[in-house]
Amino acid sequence: MNNQERKNPFFEPYNTPHDVAPFDRIRLEDYEEAMLEGIRRDDEQIEKIINNPEKPTFDNTIISVDDEKEGDNYYDLLGRVTTVFFNLLSAETNDEMDALAQKMSPILTKHSNDIRLNEKLFERISYVHRHHRKLTPEEQMLLDKCYDGFVRSGALLDAKGKERLRAITEEASMLGLQFSQNLLKENKAFTLHITDKAQLDGLPQTSVEAAAQAAQEQGKEGWVFTLDFPSYSPFMTYSTQRELRHQFYMAKNTECIHENTENNVEICKRLINLRLELAQLLGHKTYADYVLKHRMAGSVRNVYKLLNELIDAYKPAAEKEVQAIEKMARKLEGRNFKLQPWDFGFYAHKLKLEKYNIDAEMLRPYFELSKVIDGVFGLANRLYGITFKENSDIPVYHPDVKAYEVFDNDGSFLAVFYADFHPRKGKQGGAWMTEYQGQWIDRKGVNNRPHVSVVMNLTKPTAEKPALLTLGEVETFLHEFGHSLHGMFANTRFESLSGTNVWWDFVELPSQFMENFAIEKEFLRTFAFHYETGEPLPDELIERIVKSRNFNVAYGCMRQVSFGLLDMAYYTRKEPFTGDILAYEKKAWDKAQIMEQLPDTCMTVQFSHIMAGGYAAGYYSYKWAEVLDADAFSVFKKHGVFDRQTAQSFRDNILSKGGTENPMTLYKRFRGGEPTIDALLKRNGIKKQGKK
């Protein structure tokens, strides 16, 4: 086929299984063309709405604004192309994609502002908000969300205010993108290259093999370690080479503060100040006040109440945990030994081994990735009756990605599920769930099912071994899979309210809830078999996993709380930030720090969640949701962890409802009451079982 005959795949029906994105047919030049045409079509659609001579109604205005998939020949082209583009920008990017993102982001932000600040459109929405027919709870939620979304985007501002808001959002969008690109470049730029075999001392074989493979891929002799988690974490835990641990730790914790083009310090200051200005422009004292209006927490006061309760409950235990590790280090190295941050993982591992005779490497042979996949899918089948079938006819964007069809307990098609497991050059670090298509029910009553994806950075297979995971990686898989269930079970009328489109301090409940199964014997029994011998994970090893479950749990809690404090310190400011980011950070989270802080390291400049990832003034959500997940799982523990009836209630009341009602209403419907912190304290061993 010559180039003239070729059509942009975004412009025509995909003709793929379940209408999935045709990754195999998309070229770089397709994105810009489709985005610009998508903007043109959106503008055309908005003109139709505002020029409609009929009186504004919920059906001819709100539904039309929210759901542009309804016309006979119209579909949301812009949503279609930007979803693919920005998902791949995180999972499979390159310099050309990055450059295109820089070019298109301001154009897309301007387009979004043009809609939100369109006075005639807002007049119609405002009219419907005041005068409308009797609505279902879901319709009412959509109307409120639509109206409030416009207000929060500046619809009530005067002309000068609207102009300033445009400038703020366009600049913030570009800076968030630049922040992420800088971090990815810094992360991939550093490698620890070892040629002396003696310097591998202490490292597990899986780590050594992966490093040898990385060196080979780069055309180097010896072993290459990277800042990607599956490479970095084992090195910091097992390497006896203290100086190399120090070097590695400093590389990780000084990303984006070097005097180079990837420095994020000024970007962070500017983002903090732009968000403050945006909030104050819209009538709020701080950015946190602006954000928390649409969160379960509701107010800055309630966030600090939770964080302070956690500090009071966990800090004494965290201090004891660190003292025990220091004691272990001095026992091995002499009483004058000073524990540094790059020593923590190494000596914590030694102590855990002494106390429980267990470590991550002992468990790896039992967590072969293909078996873990079977186990996780089997868990979903046991709880909800759903099944997964790999389909090689579904196009994927990289050979690492597996695509599955998901079927409900009655055999009907439920969703497409993509799983992208391993680190690679063009992929951001961490793990996340996303969608290529959300769920919605169209006007003809057709339930359009979602296309859900989980992206992770799990240990890769080597020439010698298949991918063998740590228990922590199994938990990561379960976490992201929990998010994906939230997406796959979505069953709402409107896409903007379906699946994970919920308040941010509720969105982590389904994901963190799934992590609870990681140490349940009945679950481990289904898939944890030695990859060579086929032997099941021994009972006594499971007992040791359970006993060691709360090892350093208080220290881990304080670490999360410290991130929450740092986030709130930036976004509860009433005045612009002009200080020193490094010094401010140290002071902001000091209350939750257990170890001495190093003056020349910085978290802020690589804290994607609160700078570029939508968690600004919301990082506390992880701990908020942890209270919910411990409370929710206590119901399962009471009735049996695989109890179908309890699982069905969780699905019906929470997973399938998306953002159609207030999350506390949904939670109480499942639980029968509001959550308390008690279940979390008991699970973590901070409060003894049986005590009130």
Image (spheres, grey):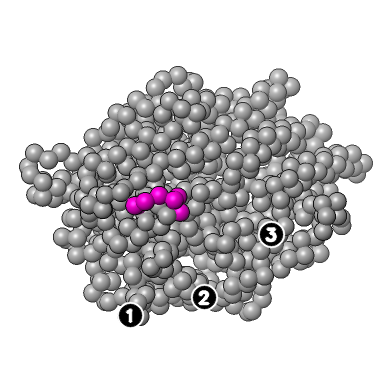
Q: Residues within 10 Å of mark 1 (few under 14, many from 20)?
A: few
The percent position of residue 37, horizontal first and vertical second, equals 81, 43
Q: Mark 1 falls on what kind of element?
A: loop
Q: Position of residue 685 (x, y in %)?
A: 25, 58
Residues at discs 1 and 2 in contact (Cβ within 8 Å): no
User: Mark 1 — residue?
Assistant: 533
For marks 3 and 2 on the same chain, the one whose residue lies earlier in the sequence: 3
Extreme-right residue of the structure: 53
Q: Which residue is mark 3?
A: 24
Q: How far is the residue under mark 3 from the one under mark 2? A: 31 Å
Residue 151 sits in which quadrant?
top right
Rounded to the nearest angstrom, the CA distance separating label 1 from label 2 is 26 Å
Q: Magenta segment range?
A: 217-223
Which residue is at the front of the view, 182 or 373?
Answer: 182
- The magenta stretch spans residue 330: no
Going 37% across and 30% down the picture, which residue do you hit?
Answer: 585
> What secondary structure is the stretch in magenta mostly built from?
loop
Label 2 sits on residue: 381
Quadrant holding the N terminus: bottom right
Which kind of residue does numbered mark 2 sit on? Asn
**435 on left or right of 462:** right
Residue 477: image quadrant is: bottom left
Disc number at residue 71? none
